[in-house]
Image: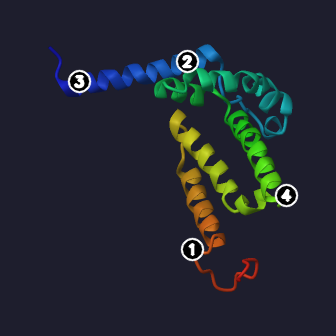
């Protein structure tokens, strides 16, 4: 009979293999970039992943009670697509809030937090699929500090772009 550390390792290896299998089965969620011009080519970086957006909402609702299925959906969906889906989710919320409050710039209240939210999404995605994340981790720290400074929790001397009421 196997000991529990061996079972734990076997379980992790099986989980990693399942992740790789699902990524291969569903198609890579990230484009293969071989040159700098490839980075700017929408035919390689964006257009192939747009169909994922059409199926995303039904897949989320179908998996809403299954955390493992949501994780698999998250790592098999291109991160640009899921970020755009988040934008599409937030847009009507801001619109309705604007109509209710008769203040049509509701997103302005969140503009100091939204970049950090999107950065956190990309950092989480990179961690989830096992990409090197040292630079992204530094990015999220800087982004959180930036957001916190705009929310008044951190005082930055000589920051003339911060509104002081």
How much space separates mark 3 and mark 2, taking CA atoms?
24 Å
Name the residue: 72% across, 39% down.
Answer: 89
- The first of marks 1 and 2 along the sequence is 2
- The first of marks 3 and 4 along the sequence is 3
Drawn side of residue 118 relative to residue 54, left or right: left
Mark 2 neighbour density, 10 Å: few (under 14) some (14–19) many (20 or more): some
- The first of marks 3 and 1 along the sequence is 3
Tally of numbered tags: 4
- The first of marks 2 and 4 along the sequence is 2
**Location of the C terminus (image quadrant):** bottom right
Name the residue: 31% across, 21% down.
Answer: 10
Question: 55 above or below 163?
Answer: above
**Which type of secondary structure does the marked residue at label 3 adopt?**
helix
Task: Single out the residue that lies furthest toward the left.
Answer: 1
Decide which of 122, 82 is in the foreground and name it. 82
Residue located beneath label 2 in the image? 22
Q: Which mark is residue 6?
A: 3
**Which type of secondary structure does the marked residue at label 2 adopt?**
helix
- Disc nearest the viewer among 3 and 4: 4
Mark 3 neighbour density, 10 Å: few (under 14) some (14–19) many (20 or more): few
**Location of the N terminus (image quadrant):** top left
Mark 1 neighbour density, 10 Å: few (under 14) some (14–19) many (20 or more): few
How much space separates mark 1 and mark 2, taking CA atoms?
42 Å
Callouts 4 and 1 close, C-beta under 8 Å? no
Q: Which mark is residue 104?
A: 4
- Disc nearest the viewer among 1 and 2: 1
How much space separates mark 4 and mark 1, taking CA atoms?
26 Å
Residue located beneath label 1 in the image? 153
- Disc nearest the viewer among 3 and 1: 1
Residue 161 coordinates in the image, percent (x, y)? 76, 77
Mark 4 neighbour density, 10 Å: few (under 14) some (14–19) many (20 or more): some
- Disc nearest the viewer among 2 and 4: 4
């Amino acid at each position: 009979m196997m000991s529990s550390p061996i079972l734990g390792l076997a379980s992790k290896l099986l989980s990693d293999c399942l992740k790789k299998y699902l990524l291969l089965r569903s198609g890579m969620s990230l484009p293969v970039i071989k040159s700098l011009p490839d980075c700017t080519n929408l035919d390689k970086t964006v257009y192939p992943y747009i169909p994922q957006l059409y199926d995303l909402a039904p897949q989320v609702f179908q998996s809403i009670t299954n955390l493992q299925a949501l994780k698999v959906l998250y790592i098999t969906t291109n991160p640009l697509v899921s970020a755009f889906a988040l934008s599409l989710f937030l847009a009507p919320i801001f619109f309705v809030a604007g109509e209710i409050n008769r203040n049509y710039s509701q997103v302005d209240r969140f503009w100091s937090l939204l970049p950090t939210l999107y950065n956190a999404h990309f950092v989480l995605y990179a961690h989830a699929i096992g990409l090197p994340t040292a630079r992204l981790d530094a990015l999220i720290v800087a982004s959180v500090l930036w957001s916190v400074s705009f929310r008044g929790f951190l005082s930055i001397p000589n920051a003339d772009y911060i509104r002081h009421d």
